Image: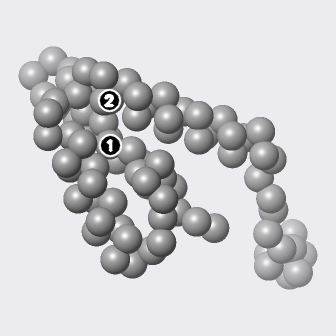
Amino acid sequence: MSFLEMFRQKKQPSANIAKERLQIIVAHERATRDGPDYLPNLQQDILAVVRKYIEIENDQVSVSVDNADNCSILELNVTLPG
């Protein structure tokens, strides 16, 4: 790798970006379907906190809860602008 290549940005193919966004949307839909009652409010609060520092849209934050065995796992995905 040459010195100049370190500063060149490699663009991610648009198909990969679309796939990642679709995965976030699907995860969001699944979370809202079977999620706990507090989840939408939690998502709005997290969105408000992130917006203090970065301008993002509503669909760029997804929150989900997965239940496995005796514990719940909170998954948070925030897509930051590039």
- Tell me which residue sits at (23%, 28%) in the image: 35
Q: What is the x, y in percent for residue 2?
A: 90, 76
Q: What is the x, y in percent for residue 37?
A: 14, 33
- Asked if the residues shown at circle 2 and circle 1 are in contact, with their CB atoms under 8 angstroms apart, the answer is yes
- Tell me which residue sits at (77%, 52%) in the image: 12
Using the numbered discs, state the Cα–Cα distance from disc 2 to disc 1 in whole angstroms: 7 Å
In this rendering, the answer to whether 40 lies above or below 23 is below
In this rendering, the answer to whether 27 lies above or below 45 is above
Q: Residue furthest top?
A: 69
Of pointers 2 and 1, the one earlier in the residue sequence: 2
Question: Label 1, on which residue?
Answer: 63
Question: Label 2, on which residue?
Answer: 31
Kindly state the secondary structure of the residue where label 2 is placed.
helix
Amino acid type, mark 1: Val
Which of the 4 image quarters holds residue 39? top left
The mark found on residue 25 in the picture is none
